[in-house]
Amino acid sequence: MKTLKKSQFSVLANEFMENTLNQLVNNYSIVQIFYKQEKNSTKSHLLISVSKNADAIKLQSKKWVAEVREQYQVYIYFIDYSRLDYQFSKGHPFIEYHCHQSSMIYQKEDSRSSLLINRNWKKYHKKFNRYEDTFHHDHEIHQLQVERLIAENSYNSVFTSYEKLIEYDLEYLEELFTGNRTFDIDLNKRINKLLIYIPELKQYFVKKNQYEYFITEIFDETKKSIEEDDIIYNSEMFDSLRIISDSLYTFITVRFYNLKYLIKNQYEKICNAGEGLFPIEESKKDEILEKAIDRILTFAELEQIYFFHQTTYGDVKTYYFLLIGLNVNNEKIKAITHSLMSLFGTQYRFLLVGHDRYWIQKNLREFQSFFVFIMQGKNLVYSSDQYHPEPHWETPHHPQHNDLYFYYKSTLGSSLQFYKLIDGEKENYQGVDNIFALFLLSFCRTYIYAKTYYLPNYMTTEALWQLCIYADMDIHKYHYLFDQFSTNIFSFTDYNMSVHHSIAKVNTEKADQMKMIVDKLMDELKETVVDGKLLDDFKINLICDKTESAILSENKIDL
């Protein structure tokens, strides 16, 4: 067989690619090579037809294919000739566009297997319409099946039908963007493969880890429930699945339109699917904000930062941030906060809430009301990628204080224990400082949960108090009690969250200050939880029975 000379690949204007293609035609049975350069873009495409399907699969998985795509933006598609010929007969638009006679840069001499498309639109458009209509017809059947099952409240079957619909759409996207379809791969791998060609898809799938997605976990749980004859009642996820399905359908529709245009008008480029959809609103930035973001990013590789609240009391301005990324743990949050304090001094304060996206997704049933108001375009001040997905919000979402009774009971128990110690043996305040610290932390977390449906991690006391102010600014009226405390109350509380073998340094004056704080904050929590009817009557009665005691009557706590 006579191979092509190197000069015939000079159209690529890339010596590495020229050498690579020469090696391919020498080492494999290459039938044809087609080349397309996108107009007004650095991207180019090489469709390489090979004699054997095994060679096509082997070559497509080569590491250098990905490296060429990353370094030179050359997208390479290996397709065996028999499949190419079959798809041509069906009117496959990807094949119709890329295998045009004007795009061929190599053909094996004396080959009896070759494909050259040189027909005009008038001869082709009926095939295109039939190909597109086939997709719409089958998609509609899947869609009607889902809608019927939703109407019948067949929860498990809805999830399995949505899985089939989304899998069907993803397969079509793979066909339309690569001219081929990968068989026998799971949903995670198919999504990851498509991201090479459609990075916009990232904004519709929440990642569980580097390779897996939350949506596949939902489908796996459904299959397990079916096997165990259980029922999944998470119907709130249906709307998120509908959004994903509708978005995939939009990508496919736009891709059909693009290919139709390109086939009719060779080398013309139109807008990409998803362009202009869901634009990110830019928040107004100030110098302090920009410096703070820069400093935060030196400590952690984050996906996104949301600037969701700001307060000013006296000369102190506080910025509230939600940090989304992997391994944004409490220790890292503390380190970032300390660094920001060193940079800005006491005039500026920063409240940092940190979670990874998968954790947020898994806890939406309880905490969605908190996150949905923060994770909006108007609050987004940093994103490492324009296609990070939003969580699959539950719609409709009915917020519930599922464990508020236990949190309130715990806080109440801490206050009762505090009174018992402080009114015990005269001026023996051993342990009072530890119980007070426990109470203050317990109060803050319970108050935040009652107001926002979010239970924060065990942050510093100051951070929790700042979240209390975010939950309800009226709580700041008690800040004067903290200012009157003989020492910095936040440092005092954090220090006393651990045991120290030392004699208590609490005197009568400090004990009275603590008692005033416990009195006021418990009154506030009671008004929020009990008087606010956040608990049912049975649980409220249990609380009242517990608090009708000599300790409370002696301390004149009104119920």
Image (tube, rainbow, N blue to C red):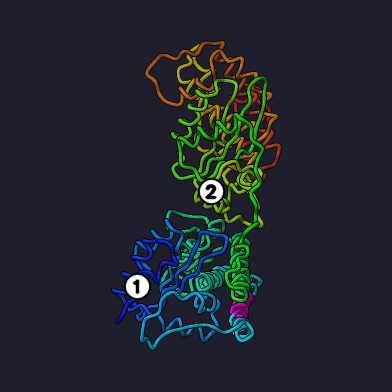
Pointer 1: residues within 10 angstroms few (<14), some, or many (20+)? few
- Residue situated furthest front in the rendering: 7
- Mark 2 belongs to which amino acid? Ile
Q: Is residue 234 left or right of residue 356?
A: right
- The percent coordinates of residue 410 (x first, y second) are 54, 35
- Asked where in the image residue 444 lies, by quadrant, the reply is top right
Specify whether residue 135 is painted magenta. yes
| Residue 488 in sight | yes
Number of numbered discs visible in the structure rendering = 2
Judged from the image, the secondary structure of the residue bearing numbered disc 1 is: loop
| Label 2 – label 1 distance at C-alpha | 57 Å
**Which image quarter holds the N terminus?**
bottom left
Judged from the image, the secondary structure of the residue bearing numbered disc 2 is: helix
- The percent coordinates of residue 237 (x first, y second) are 59, 60
Pointer 2: residues within 10 angstroms few (<14), some, or many (20+)? some
**Where does the magenta region start and end?**
132-145
| Residue 535 in sight | no
- The percent coordinates of residue 211 (x first, y second) are 42, 58
- Mark drawn on residue 5: 1
Which residue is found at the position 59% from the left and 42% from the top? 454
- Asked where in the image residue 141 lies, by quadrant, the reply is bottom right
Q: Are marks 2 and 1 in contact (CB under 8 Å)?
A: no
Q: Is residue 250 left or right of residue 73?
A: right
- Asked where in the image residue 58 lies, by quadrant, the reply is bottom left
Q: Nearer the viewer, residue 251 or 38?
A: 38
Q: Is residue 167 above or below residue 411?
A: below
Residue at label 2? 360
Which residue is found at the position 49% from the left and 43% from the top? 302
